[in-house]
Image (cartoon, coloured by chain):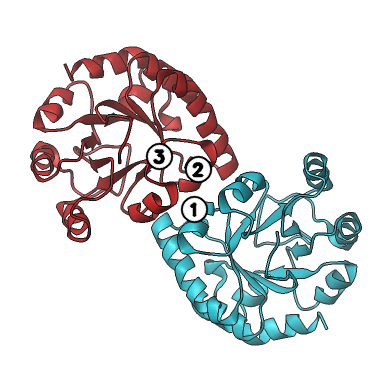
Chain colours: A red, B cyan
Amino acid sequence: MVNKFKIQGVYLVTDRPLCLYHSLSEVVRLAALGGVSLVQLREKETNSRKFLELAKYLKEILSPFSVPLLINDRLDICLAAGADGVHLGQSDLPWWEARRILGNDALIGLSLETKEDYHSLIQTHPNPPLDYLAVSPVFDTNTKTNTKPAWGLTGVTWLKEKTNLPIVAIGGVNESNAKSIIDAGADSLAVVSAICSAKDPKLATETLSKKFH
Amino acid sequence: MVNKFKIQGVYLVTDRPLCLYHSLSEVVRLAALGGVSLVQLREKETNSRKFLELAKYLKEILSPFSVPLLINDRLDICLAAGADGVHLGQSDLPWWEARRILGNDALIGLSLETKEDYHSLIQTHPNPPLDYLAVSPVFDTNTKTNTKPAWGLTGVTWLKEKTNLPIVAIGGVNESNAKSIIDAGADSLAVVSAICSAKDPKLATETLSKKFH
């Protein structure tokens, strides 16, 4: 909200099953060396104890780089791990509860799956105390299922014209389409497999980072 | 910890798939009418948003009865719903993190699966600021899988002699064995199917409650 972190650049969303050549923690370390701007820990199957341990470990890895760590959905893991905030989807805890519980210093991002999600957000909160809005998915992807139709580049531009909040594009983002998504208005590109499944996650992050220059 | 609720009597652990004759909320209402002393909302498959909505709804149902609502594992749901506390298993968030995050007024119970769990608890915290310890499972059960060998009645008595904390027995508790578990030292009996699957959850709760007299 009044945050020390600027939401811009490459945003890594973790997915352990997609970490093909390195452990998740090594992927995160290499992404940090490659200039990643933010990491979101997403764990859907793990129990809370292991989720917390992993979050603490990643926080340790990222702190020297001053790269913030967000937790997907789980405010309690964020609080217990001392992470920087949470990323919330439409079926996660409501963002206003997260803001109330985590306080003003926490970094809170919200996924919008449709234009209706944006309209209903703005209807109740013309200036929502959020740190970014995520266009999800910008393109169709195999990483996340059950998502609504993709926003496409025109969707990114549509949202950019509506809001002053930073825009994160997620879903099907890779090296080849990165530039076009940035040109459409995205401040940050969230990637999963483009870094997690890369043989060289540092190089993959660097390559994506260069698209912002 | 310094709690307004006494841990004694019938303790309902919810399980929606096991609610055969009534909705979960109706089971909870009927159990409250039957004199349930505590309800733990356990949801393993639901998304956070629906989990929270259900927690808030159950809190509304239970408040007029002054029956506390605990949330299984999820501190964030507890905080957002204004529930009374959490029940934690060995693979959930650590209880000391829960105490730190929820504060001294929250009701926090911890499941012990083995005597070693008790010893390691006491080794680090001779007087742990917990509201109860749960012997889990007291008997083998189909409701919860992957649990360690059952404590049995001798296990309940063993723990009762070790601790001043209230003891909740969970796992395979029903009308026929309730009295023997109380006689062995349990302060509270946690049941799942004995109430959730009952045709008359109010009567089932009353019948179990009478075992304490």
Indicate left or right for A77 with A143 as reference.
Answer: right
| Residue drawn 62% across the image and 60% down it | B105
- Are marks 1 and 2 in one subunit? no
- In the image, residue A188 lies at what x, y percent? 23, 30
| Residue drawn 64% across the image and 76% down it | B195
Residue type, label 3: Gly
Residue type, label 1: Asp
The residue singled out by tag 1 in the image is: B76
Res. B96 mark? none
Quote the CA–CA distance across marks 3 and 2. 8 Å
- Against B150, is B27 above or below? below
Quote the CA–CA distance across marks 1 and 2. 9 Å
- Against A96, is A157 above or below? above
- In the image, residue B117 lies at what x, y percent? 78, 45
- In the image, residue B9 lies at what x, y percent? 74, 75
- Are marks 3 and 2 in one subunit? yes
Q: Chain of mark 3?
A: A
Q: Nearer the viewer, residue A189 or B106?
A: B106
Asked if disc 3 and disc 2 are in contact, CB closer than 8 Å, the reply is: no
